[in-house]
Image (cartoon, rainbow, N blue to C red):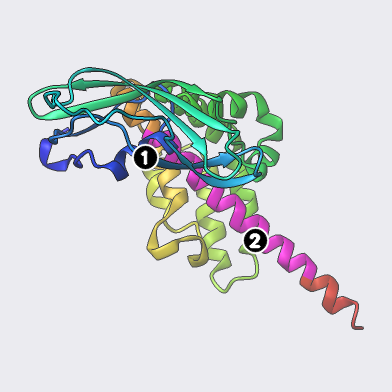
Amino acid sequence: MKLDKLSELSNKEIKNFIETTPLYTWKEFKKTNRTSLQIDEIDSFCKTCDQIRPFHDMRPRGSGAGMAIQPLSSGTTNFYFTCVSCKKEYLLCNVEQVIDNQTIKIQKFGELPRKAIDRDKLLKKFFSNDSDNYEKAVVCLSHGYGVAAFAYFRRIIENNIIKLLDMIQEDSSSLANSQEIKEALDNLRKESPMSNKIEIANNALPEYLKPDGLNPLGRLYKILSEGVHNLNDQECLSRANIVQECLKFLISELSTRKTNSDRFKKLVGSLN
């Protein structure tokens, strides 16, 4: 990545890295005049407190008086944070850093306790007939295996895209432009080049499913058109996350509207 596009490795960036980055996923930053990666605080879920809490590094540190200050060098850094509320739960994190003249690259290679793998309830229900692939996709995603996660999510889209199109058509049937949307959805069901499907997908969604003009369905078809072998692991990881977020948004919005619509019909019907 070009140097001008890299962020500086600040305490905020290190905090975000520890809190959110999967194991074995490299992050690259501009080199700064740091002497260590150590930070004082992160936020994490505490099992004892049963909520997100501040975790502090409570280890005693020497003053370093009389010792020459050394710049950060390639090697490893160990983090140990304890919940400030209960003082029982902890987070241990091992990080490898690689330093060159201009950049600092870091990756986590160990973490205790292991983070629970997030499985979105709506997606899990939607992919109930494809649960094996979904399980493999989220496991690969949580461990930073980008190529594998992307490959599994592509397979999931291919297996479930018609089901998703059916949900969109059912939900948009009462809209003024429902016929236009129906024709676009019908075209997406036909065998045709993927480049055509990307363009058609832009007309296949009602406006409420396109926040700020962004089209999650078109993005899904665009990702389907990309070859896994042309992308590196980090690029695949990014696309796998995009796939999951697009699917979450579409399925969540469609499910919520259906639930609210059914509840409204039932409520109004009971007034007769």
What amino acid type should be assigned to the residue bearing mark 2? Answer: Asp
Q: How many marks?
A: 2
Quarter of image, res 73: top left
Cα–Cα span, label 2 and label 1: 49 Å
Q: Secondary structure at mark 1?
A: loop
Q: At x 77% / y 73%, what residue is drawn? A: 264
Q: Earlier in the sequence, mark 2 or mark 1?
A: 1
- Is residue 262 left or right of 99 when viewed as pictured? right
Estimate the x, y position of residue 7 in percent, counting from the top left: 20, 42
- Mark identifier at residue 264: none
Q: Dot 2: few (<14), some (14–19), or many (≥20) neighbours within 10 Å?
A: some
- Check the image and report above or below for 155 versus 16: above
Residue positioned most to the left: 101
Q: Is residue 100 magenta?
A: no
Estimate the x, y position of residue 170 in percent, counting from the top left: 67, 58
Q: Is residue 259 magenta?
A: yes
Q: Look at the image and tell me whether residue 224 can be seen.
A: no
What amino acid type should be assigned to the residue bearing mark 1? Answer: Asp
Question: What span is colored magenta in the figure?
Answer: 238-263
- Is residue 225 left or right of 89 when viewed as pictured? left
Closer-to-camera residue (192/34): 34
Estimate the x, y position of residue 34 in percent, counting from the top left: 17, 33
Q: Which residue is mark 2?
A: 171
Closer-to-camera residue (120/220): 120
Q: Which residue is mark 1?
A: 40
Q: At x 73% / y 61%, what residue is drawn? A: 259
